[in-house]
Amino acid sequence: MQGQLMFAILFVTLCVETLAEDEFLYKQFTDPERDAFHYGKFQEDFAWGVATASYQIEGAWNEDGKGPSVWDTFAHTPGKTHLNQTADVTCDSYHKIAEDVKNLKELGVNHYRFSLSWSRIMPKGTPDEINPAGVQYYHDLIDALLAANIQPMVTLYHWDMPQVLMDIGGWENELMHALFVAYADFCFNEYGGKVTKWITFNEPTVFTVFGYEIGYHAPGKTHLGWGAYRAGHIVLKAHASAYHLYDKKYRASQNGVVGITLHARWYEPKTDTDADRAAAQRALTGELGWFAHPVFLTGDYPEVAKELIAAKSRAVGLTSSRFPEFTEEEKQMLKGSADFFGLNHYSTSYIENKVDASLIPNIMSDLDYKASEDDSWDRTGSWWLRPVPWGLRRTLKWIKKTYGDIPVYITENGMSENDGPVRLEDTDRVTYYRAYINEILKAQQIDGVNLKGYIAWTLMDNFEWAEGYNERFGLFHVDFNDPDRPRTARASAKAFAQIIKDNGFIKAKEKSEL
Ligand code: GAL
């Protein structure tokens, strides 16, 4: 009996000791298997960075020969954004290269992910007319980054299509395929001597669904039932052709890599029933696989999505599916058309099975599921964003299991707060970053995911699309009422810098011995 007591005391002492070091970052997530803190370091050449996008930070919307983009048009249309706010000036990064690079250095990042504004480089959307001042702006930015030992990771398309191209139908016009390739060709040729990491498209699911199917984002089309599938089909072909162009014309001399960035939430079955488990799998396969299967697996859309969309199209009397089909040649082009998988991940949902027989079948109803959140999950400044760190690790495992050992970069991850009094002590964001980065460390070290880097969203508060300035995601606070747009580091900037410095997470005890 006494022996048992001694053992119990010893056991409790050990546990207390373990818990002191192995903290749980979120009070509601305390499963020792799933949520315990993991100590360790990433590999030496791990990519650490932050991301931004041209329309969200540059401002100077009509300066120095820049043409308007669909986002200029959309935000200038009353009723489209929070308080009719625009990004005409936003962070004014067009005039603040030195300051942005100084802040990047303060974070200690070795990568900066930003996007090119197509209409700043080509005001008319084609290489027939180039805007030298726009071209020079990105040279200046890239040169300043390289001088600071920061590698540029460049997104060609982060949603701000030249308005002139929207006037001919945007991503619903087949011509966009060739036009995008011509734009990519120009950029590879112009900047490829200095840029070795390229992303063709940012989150095609988001800009095609929001932009062409429900109209919540530019260009504001509400082509319910077919807009996103049609636009996405052309985007995929444009991606594959740009990839092959790089491969044939530039890779040998420039030695870079080209990938695509896809958005994925983790979908956890709401209950342990077969129906909910199948629904969660279907939702992941149908949504992430819509763009990932063609590029990383088969060259074609996932079978489950093809079957469901065809059946739902037939059910309402259509003679062909609303989901377009690739030719054999296109499938060959698509299959394997990326050197890395860029993953944007922010949150998780529960998924339950729900058969949906809408009379206007559409992208939201086609996959027969319903998403919800857990009341116990914390809230942020965005209704769709609840911190559930373990969801990121599960997403990464799912990607590895489904697409194999492809190199993965997290190209966005972060959290928002609402506009309000200046708040520099953002302890919730510190917790978010520590917890999510800890999960990717587990994915890499325990699950063997081929993880190459982590890029946080975002360097500084900026124009959050339809939400305007009401959702702040920045590691740096920006004062949008001051004409100078001063940036001030938040606590999260310092915490992120520390993680980068440690290249992971070192136990306090080991740190003090360093
Ligand atoms: C992503 C998008 C970013 C940023 C972020 C936060 O979907 O790529 O531009 O807005 O979400 O909502």
Image: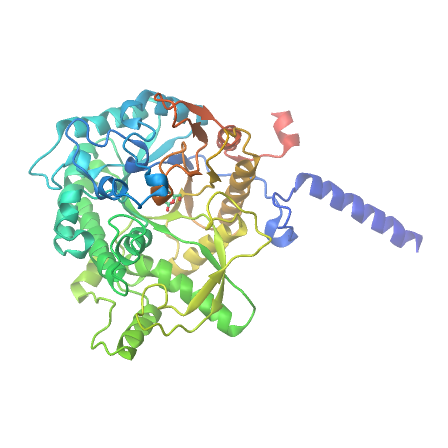
x and y, in percent, of residue 131 in the image: 13, 31
Task: Quadrant for the N terminus, please.
Answer: bottom right
Q: Is residue 249 visible?
A: no
Report the front residue among 163 and 110: 163
Residue 458 in the image: above or below residue 233? above
What is the quadrant of residue 459 in the picture? top left
Whole-percent x, y for residue 103 in the image:
40, 24
What residue is shown at x 31% (from left), y 23% (from top)? 96
Q: Is residue 107 left or right of residue 170?
A: right
Q: Quadrant of residue 66?
A: top left
**Residue at the image point whose x is 48% and y is 32% from the top:** 500
Residue 270: x, y in percent?
Answer: 54, 65
Q: Quadrant of residue 224?
A: bottom left
Q: Give the residue at x 34% y 44%.
A: 466
Q: Residue at x 30, y 77 (%)?
A: 311
The quarter of the rendering in which ligand 1 is drawn is: top left
The number of numbered badges drawn on the structure is 0
Direction right: furthest residue:
2
Q: Quadrant of the C terminus?
A: top right
Comparing 148 with 375, the one in front is: 375
Left or right side of 452 for 67: left
Can residue 3 be seen from the camera position used here?
yes
